[in-house]
Image (cartoon, rainbow, N blue to C red):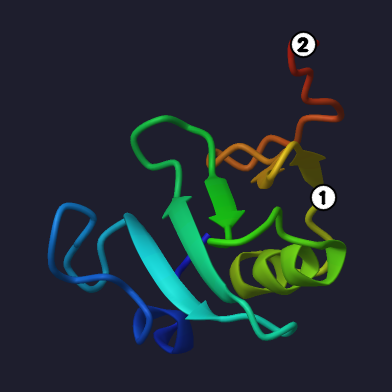
Amino acid sequence: MKFSPKLEEHRLRKGAYGSCPGAPYGVFELQGPCGERLLIVADDGRDSSWEHVSVSTKRRIPNWQEMCFVKDLFWAPEVCVVVHAAAISTTASSDGNRRDTVRYPSR
């Protein structure tokens, strides 16, 4: 996963969640396709071997269109993602090994 120059424009650079441009992780805030501001937390997996992206809004759980929008910001069309609660997570590890299933504990 690489953060595109378009996405880098929306990286938070100051405050508790700020990070430097080009860092392998970050928090991004941008307008979503349905009019909501999206808060996105992303990590390229360099330190954990797992790429991860979470998305939220202030008012509600992100809808399917917003989650697809976020998925397309970070991964190629052929990459599978798993929708879990109010977040999306890739099923591909950063070492390139695909995982067929990601299991989450039931509530």
The quadrant where residue 99 appears: top right
Could you say which is closer to the camera, residue 26 or residue 1?
A: 26
* Residue 91 image position (x, y, % from top left): 72, 38
* Residue 56 image position (x, y, % from top left): 58, 56
Q: Residues within 10 Å of mark 1 (few under 14, many from 20)?
A: some
Image quarter hosting the C terminus? top right
Q: CA distance from mark 1 to mark 2?
A: 24 Å
Could you say which is closer to the camera, residue 61 or residue 82?
A: 61
The amino acid type of the residue labelled 2 equals Arg
Residue drawn at (40%, 69%) of the image: 28
The quadrant where residue 67 appears: bottom right
So how many labels did they put on this image? 2
* Residue 58 image position (x, y, % from top left): 53, 61
What is the secondary structure assignment of the residue under circle 2?
Answer: loop
In-image side of 27 versus 92 (left or right) = left
* Residue 63 image position (x, y, % from top left): 80, 62
Could you say which is closer to the camera, residue 96 or residue 72?
A: 72
Residues under numbered marks 1 and 2 in contact, where contact means CB atoms less than 8 Å apart? no
In-image side of 55 versus 5 (left or right) = right
The amino acid type of the residue labelled 1 equals Cys
Q: Which residue is mark 1?
A: 80
Residue drawn at (49%, 80%) of the image: 30
The quadrant where residue 15 appears: bottom left
Residue that sits furthest to the front in the current view? 59
In-image side of 70 versus 68 (left or right) = left
Task: Tell me the number on the disc at residue 10.
Answer: none
Q: Is residue 1 above or below residue 50?
A: below
Residue drawn at (53%, 59%) of the image: 1
- Looking at marks 1 and 2 on the same chain, the residue that comes earlier in the sequence is marked by 1
Q: Which residue is mark 2?
A: 107
